[in-house]
Image (cartoon, rainbow, N blue to C red):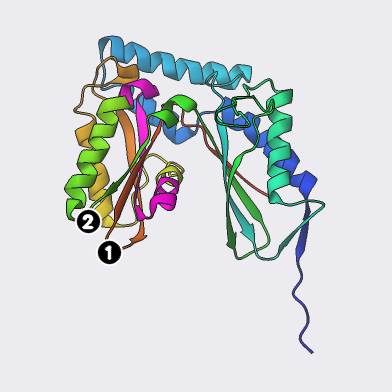
Amino acid sequence: MKSEKAVRIIKSIEISNAVEKLCADANYLLPADVLNSLKENSGKEKGTAKDIFDEIIKNAEIAETEKIPLCQDTGSANFFIKIGKDVVIEDGDIYSGVNNGVAECYKKKYLRKSIVSDPLERKNTGDNTPANIYVDIVDGENIEIIFLPKGGGSENASALKMLEPSAGWDGVKDFVLNAVKEKGANACPPLIIGIGIGGDFASVGYLAKKSLLREIGSKNTNPYYEEKEKELLAEINKLNIGAMGLGGNTAALAVFINTKPCHIASLPAAVNIQCHSCRRMTIKI
C-alpha cells in the first residue's frame, strides 16, 4: 500500500504576521543592490545631479536608522508568491493571510494608505488593501513571498502597446524610448525600467512588472536580451533626463527585459517604470 505524502501545515496567521513585518521592513530599507548602484552612479555626476544623488543616498540612510518610510508614497502592495505543493494553509488562504498582514502593517506603522475601493468613486479602503497577489505553485514545503510596494507616480509613467510583428526590435526600442522621454522625468529618476515583450494584452504588463524583481547587476539569462538591455540603458542615459528630471548622465540605473511566447499576429510590449526608491524584499516561511 502506497503511503500518503506528508504535508506541511501553515496557519494563515503565520502568513499575516510575516507579511506585516515584511511590509514595514521593505518600506524602510532600500535593497543593497539599489543603494550600491546609486553610490556608483553618483560618481558619474556633478553639480545639481550629484547633489540629488547624495540626497537620495542620505534619505535611505535616515529611513533605515529612524525606521521611517523611504518615500511618503508607500505604494500599492504587490506580492509575487511561490507556494510549495506540499503546503496546506489552515484557517484561511494565501489571499486573506496576505491582505490581513498588509492591513495590520499599514495601520499600525502609519504607512500611507493609497488604495481606493472603486476607480471612479475614489473612496479610500483605509488599510491599503486589497493587495495585488500573483501566485505560482512550485515543488517543496515552503512559501516564498516577494513584496514590491509600487508608487503611483512611477506606475502612471508606465505604458503598453500592441505592436505589429513587423515592428521587431526597432519598434520595441522606439516604444520604450518614447515612453521614457514622455513621462520618465515625472517618475522620480534615476529609474529602473522593466520591459515585457510577448504574451498577450493581459500578461505583458505582468512580465514588465515582474522583471523589476531582478537585482541591479544581474544578467539576463538570454544573451540576446542581455545585449538589448545594455543597448537600451545606454540610449536612455543619453536622453539627459538625469536625476529627478533635472538633467545629468543617469536617467536609469538598469533595464530588465522579460519575454514570453506570443501569437503569430501580435507583438505586445509593456514598460513598467520604477522610481529610484525601488523597494523590494523577500521572505520564506
Label number found at residue 264: 1
Determine the secondary structure under disc 1: loop
Q: Where is residue 45 in the image (x, y as percent from the top left)?
A: 26, 18
Label number found at residue 76: none
Disc 2 or 1, which lies upstream in sequence?
2
Residue type at mark 1 is Ile
Residue 201 is inside the magenta segment: yes
Give left or right: position of 149 versus 194. Answer: right
Residue 186 is inside the magenta segment: yes
Image quarter of residue 112: top right
Give left or right: position of 136 versus 187. Answer: right
Determine the secondary structure under disc 2: helix
Relative height, residue 182 to residue 271 (above, below)? above
Q: Which of 140 and 160 is in front in this view?
A: 160
Image quarter of residue 140: bottom right
Q: In the rendered image, which quarter contains the N terminus?
A: bottom right
Label number found at residue 165: 2
